[in-house]
Image (cartoon, helix red, strand yellow):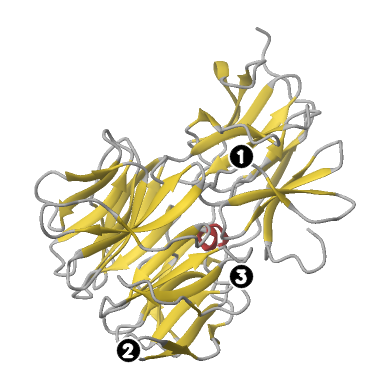
Amino acid sequence: LLTSAGSALGAGAEGTWNAQGIILFAAIGTGKMYQVPDTGGPPQPVGPYSVIGGPWPSFLPDGRHFVFSEAPGVRGGGIDISSLDGMPPVRLTTALGPAAFLRPDLLVFVRGSALVAQRLAPDYQRLVGPVLTITSSGIGETDFNPGFSASAAGAIAYGSGTSMHQLNWFDHTGKQRGAAAAPDKALLLAPAVSPDGRVAALDRTVAGNRDVWLLDLTRGALTRFTNNPDDDGYPVWSPDGSEIAFSSGRTPIGIYLKPASGAGAARFLIGGHIEPLDWSRDGRYLLANRVDQTGYDLWALPMTGEMRAPLPVTSGAGTVTTGAFSPDGRWVAYVTDRSGQPQVMVQGFPNSIGPWPVSLAGGLQPRWSPDGRVVYFVAPDGALMAAALTIHDKAVQIAAPKILVPHSGMDSFLQLHKQAYAVAPDGRLLLDQDVEGGAVPLTIVLNWHPPAR
């Protein structure tokens, strides 16, 4: 996708093109969608809202409305509809992945392991009637995998292969040091290594059910930590390793705490569309993203005393996504699109001095080294980067970032929003990587029509 020269949006991902010559696309790392004429020109934002993950927008026949996807998160994953006029999104289905329109009135999407279609009401506000199966050949075995394409005229193409993910170890120099677990066909998100380095908590979606799982880093065994029909995810360890905080779509929606042993029920911490990101080493604050229709803000939630009122960490910093505390708790690294392109910044906490830029040409997913002397991040092309820091009392000196893992192999969807890697207490890096597979069979269906009513 080519936009105007000098555009600071960075890389685009997933686009759709209407008959009036408008291209709609998602800007990587910002959670925002933009429109641009196919003749070129400056991209314009579509609506004030932000979305989680890779939206995969797709226009409807009127050229104004479009459907898009939202990844699992505190609002729950699903397929929404909006318009170029900035109509607030309306949830059509909780199914994960993209959607496409088939004439005269069908929306095609993946549910479980099947490619299905359901009629879209004339007002575009809901799906109606039975869910119709196009194929049940295993297209959706990897959740939130695009897996198919469709034209409005009735042609459908889909692949029946399964992509795989694997958690692999790398040392601080970027050399691979073996696998932490066997390849996994489930979507993995937000790995977090326990303070003792023995267990990784991760966000794992199996057959559409998203929960927190625990991975034994010695034996490679996976066990389910939460088991709820609503979304549970984005786990964060307490500094002493006794509890895990996670976001949940259960009632009430918000952040919950559960003993890391698995014994006992999860207890409600704070409500709202809020996602935990990191826990300060002194136990005083939980760093979190607060999400609303206008975007993401970074907050610090007090974890000691009786007050639970979140404190704003960033002010006027644009859309702020991922963030992490420095080991001493005096600094926060985060991602903001204030410049028009996602960049990693470091600022003081709680005094908010700064910020100082860490990335130079775009960056996502910041993490600190255990000694606080390096900030890792992911470049727009997927490379894992490392920037050395020299921290003074009231200032930070940051060296030019260096490439640590040139082709990290981390899932492109994960790069858009949430962490695809973790830093262990011993300094090793745990990366969630795509596993190379063989050719995926492609099936073409022509002139598909639903059964007669």
The relative height of residue 69 versus residue 429 in the rendered view (above or below) is: above
Q: In this view, does 145 lie to the left or right of 176?
A: right
Pick the front one: 52 or 351? 351
Under circle 2, the secondary element is loop
Indicate the quadrant containing the C terminus: top left, top right, bottom left or bottom right: top right
Residue tagged 2: 393
Question: Dot 3: few (<14), some (14–19), or many (≥20) neighbours within 10 Å?
Answer: many
Q: How many marks?
A: 3
Using the image, tell me which numbered label, if any, was put on residue 68.
1
Q: Position of residue 217 (x, y in %)?
A: 27, 71
Pick the front one: 116 or 77? 77
Query: Which residue is the extreme one toward the right?
Result: 39
Q: Position of residue 177 (x, y in %)?
A: 40, 84
- The residue at 10%/57% (across/down) is 305
Question: Dot 1: few (<14), some (14–19), or many (≥20) neighbours within 10 Å?
Answer: many
- The residue at 50%/49% (across/down) is 295
| Identity, as a three-letter code, of the amino acid under mark 3 | Pro
Q: How far apart are marks 2 and 1 (CA)?
A: 46 Å
Q: Where is residue 196 in the image (x, y as percent from the top left)?
A: 18, 75
| Identity, as a three-letter code, of the amino acid under mark 2 | Asp
Q: Position of residue 252 (x, y in %)?
A: 26, 35
Nearer-N-terminus badge (3/2): 3
- Using the rendered image of the protein, determine whether residue 338 is visible from the camera's viewpoint: yes
The relative height of residue 92 versus residue 168 in the rendered view (above or below) is: above
On the image, which quarter does residue 83 sit in?
Answer: top right
| Identity, as a three-letter code, of the amino acid under mark 1 | Phe
Q: Distance between the residues labelled 3 and 1?
A: 22 Å
Nearer-N-terminus badge (3/1): 1
Residue tagged 3: 380
Pick the front one: 300 or 372? 300
Under circle 3, the secondary element is loop
